[in-house]
Amino acid sequence: ETGVTQTPRHLVMGMTNKKSLKCEQHLGHNAMYWYKQSAKKPLELMFVYSLEERVENNSVPSRFSPECPNSSHLFLHLHTLQPEDSALYLCASSQEGGQGISGNTIYFGEGSWLTVV
Amino acid sequence: GQNIDQPTEMTATEGAIVQINCTYQTSGFNGLFWYQQHAGEAPTFLSYNVLDGLEEKGRFSSFLSRSKGYSYLLLKELQMKDSASYLCAASGGGGADGLTFGKGTHLIIQP
């Protein structure tokens, strides 16, 4: 148990579907992240939210739409995805403004396995 | 830009010692992390270095040389459960900017 919970753990969707991934953190952190992990590739940072404001978007296609209603919850809305979007999507959180290890360490959820058919 | 390099795969024997190297090039630097990831699971935090030198934590140690852009993770008394991917990650110039990860080193432990 990492303190970061993601649902669903597994999702299969068609290319015309609309679905959402949900993340909740119980660590009292003020920054949350979405990462994508594909086979044979490094973890890719998709979105960063700090104090509920989006601070970074690494040129992610608009078919991925994040939402951060409060510091504990993060969503990733999915629409008209492509088969190459099939991957493990990891949510993470950290405490921005802290020093050293406590300020930088990112804690990951278990991930949502997404398959686009 | 950010670039993290680490070996793709390593094999070691149960009970032995293994060193996993990582080199990084980052536009800003605020620390070097190592994570462990078992197949099908989330990455879990192992260590953090921001100053030069060795940090020891039980069977695992991590080393950093900022001037060389180099780190290693040392695993001692290897156990079968240590078979996993080990991810090297660098923190950028500060703030909630996330981490840049390497591709990970898949460590195979043989009896």
Image: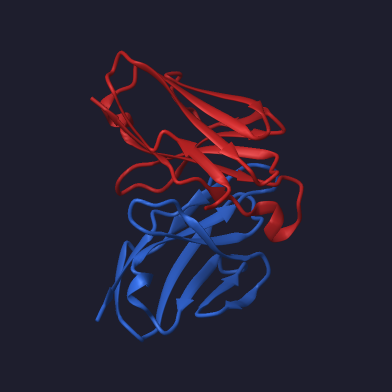
Q: Quadrant of residue B18?
A: bottom left
Q: Is residue B33 left or right of residue A70?
A: left
Give x and y (percent) for residue B80: 32, 75
Chain painted in blue in the figure = B
Q: What residue appears at the point 40 percent right and 48 percent down from the top-left corner?
A: A42
Image quarter of the C terminus of chain A: top left
Give x and y (percent) for residue A50: 68, 35
Q: Quadrant of residue A101?
A: bottom right
Give x and y (percent) for residue A11: 33, 30
Q: Is residue A95 left or right of residue A17?
A: right
Q: What residue appears at the point 56 percent right and 69 percent down from the top-left corner?
A: B68
Colour option used: by chain
Relative to B34, say whether B65 is above or below: below
Q: What residue appears at the point 36 percent right and 86 percent down from the top-left corner?
A: B16
Q: Is residue B101 left or right of residue A93?
A: left
Chain painted in red in the figure = A
Q: What residue appears at the point 59 percent right and 71 percent down from the top-left corner?
A: B65
Relative to B49, say whether A72 is above or below: above
Q: How many marks?
A: 0
Q: Nearer the viewer, residue A92 or B97?
A: A92
Q: Quadrant of residue B33?
A: bottom right
Q: Nearer the viewer, residue B98 or B23?
A: B98
Farthest top residue?
A: A16
Q: Nearer the viewer, residue B87 or A9?
A: A9
Relative to B8, say whether A20 is above or below: above
